[in-house]
Image (tube, rainbow, N blue to C red):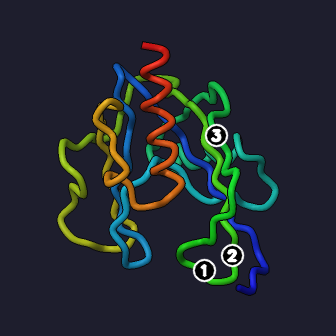
Amino acid sequence: MNLKHFTIRVYGLIIEDHKVLLSDEFQLETKMTKFPGGGMEFGEGPADCIKREAIEEFGQEIEVIEHFYTTDFFQKALFYDDHQLISIYYLVRFTEPIRFNLSKKAFDFEEMKNGNQSFRWKKISELSEEDFTFPIDKIVAGMLKRRMIYEG
């Protein structure tokens, strides 16, 4: 393994009524279900990144509530052979009512074309590892479920 770069991804965990917002996307010729968010750019911090990503993905602003989790183990990037992945998750909320379309089903778009994306709510109590494409999201889903049990 010849790693030369870090890829830093930042995600927003948006929770309402014991449900979390999921993103179904077609990117890099791949169907993926994940939490909303994306890659951090040079010159921005993680909180700035998730705020920018919210504007890009939802067309709406969010407020960062608190840090939830940062990858604490080695994870090779899925799409780049020489990259190590670090993922950062924040609990966030919308600053105003949702104005974008929500779906009832996964991949609610007409064709598998790079850049297509849809959003849907899923009950946290019903989350499973199989819902997610990426290993770190699977771990975070389990953490969310455990947190809901403890907090009620």
- Residue sitting at 34 percent across and 19 percent down? 17
Q: How dense is the environment of label 2, judged by Cα within 10 Å: few (below 14), some, or many (20 and up)?
A: some
Query: Which amino acid, by three-letter code, is at mark 2?
Result: His
Q: Which residue is drawn at 48% across and 17% down?
A: 150
On screen, residue 61 above or below 27: above
User: Residue 24: x percent and y percent?
Assistant: 33, 55
Give the residue number, with chain letter if any, for mark 1.
Answer: 80
Asked if the residue at tag 2 contacts the one at tag 3, i.e. Cβ–Cβ closer than 8 Å, the answer is no
Vertical relation: 16 (above or below) 11: above
Residue at far bottom of view: 2
Q: Is mark 1 on a helix, strand or loop?
A: loop
Q: Nearer the viewer, residue 33 or 60?
A: 33
Estimate the x, y position of residue 140 in percent, counting from the top left: 51, 43
- Please report contact status of discs 1 and 3: CB closer than 8 Å, yes or no: no
Task: Judge from the rendering whether residue 150 lies leftward or rightward of residue 100; answer left or right.
Answer: right
Q: Do the residues labelled 1 and 2 touch (CB within 8 Å)?
A: yes
